[in-house]
Image (cartoon, grey):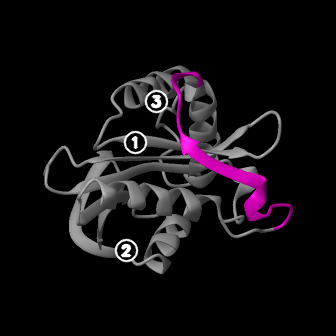
Amino acid sequence: MAGGPGGRAADFLIRPAHETDAPAIATVWHRSALVGYEGIFPEAAPPPTLEALTARTRKAIASQGRHGLVLVAVRNDPDRTVVGTVTAVADPREGSRARIQRLYVDPGYWGRGIGRGLHDRALEHLDDAGFRVVVLWVLERNIRARAAYERWGWRPTPGRHSPYPGVVEVCYLLML
């Protein structure tokens, strides 16, 4: 991973998630969503709760296998604090392709190459599992994430859906 202010590649490790990581992953997800999605969801939209995110994370970790993997980026120090996460799975809509989802980095660690490191490790896993086509969905108004994905070689497709009234997700595609 590339270093940034206060962080070098040696400062972070990427590893498969363990069930005990679920609350920390949920916290990263929550913090990242609150900052990264600010102004995207209507004010009336209920924010995600840590309890719901922890439950979803536990379910994802429990279902890991050949085609599914939850990764975490942790500080390379005695505390091993979780600072980022990503999930790589078979696409539930089309089993011959894969999906990258839930790529979140704690906002205090943005710009240090952690997201790119998680992304690349997830793609390595999917490539090793035999997938050649990978998709991801990203909020249309999440310009920061979309710009990163496009720099990393992802291309937008015509796919769109609305996870919440007034909010649109767009589909991106990458060939391995």
Asked if residue 65 is positioned above or below residue 96 in the image, the reply reads above
Say which element carries label 3: helix
Mark 3 crowdedness (10 Å alpha carbons): few <14, some 14-19, many ≥20: many
Please, what is the three-letter code of the amino acid marked with disc 3? Thr
Q: Is residue 13 magenta?
A: yes
Residue position for label 1: 69
Expressed as whole percent of the image width and height from the top left, the position of residue 149 reads 45, 70
Gap between marks 1 and 2, in whole Å? 20 Å
Q: Is residue 129 magenta?
A: no
Label whose residue precedes the other's in the sequence (2 or 3): 3
Query: For the residues carrying marks 1 and 3, which lies nearer the camera in this image?
Result: 1
Residue position for label 3: 57
Please, what is the three-letter code of the amino acid marked with disc 1? Leu
Q: Is residue 75 left or right of residue 72?
A: right
Expressed as whole percent of the image width and height from the top left, the position of residue 51 reads 53, 20
Label whose residue precedes the other's in the sequence (1 or 2): 1
Please, what is the three-letter code of the amino acid marked with disc 2? Trp
Q: Which residues are magenta?
A: 5-20
Residue 154 — which label? Answer: 2
Expressed as whole percent of the image width and height from the top left, the position of residue 117 reads 57, 61
Label whose residue precedes the other's in the sequence (1 or 3): 3
Looking at the picture, tell me which residue is in the foreground, 64 or 38.
Answer: 64
Expressed as whole percent of the image width and height from the top left, the position of residue 33 reads 56, 45
Tag 1 near tag 3, CB within 8 Å: no
Say which element carries label 1: strand
**Residue 112 seen from this side:** yes
**Residue 169 seen from this side:** no
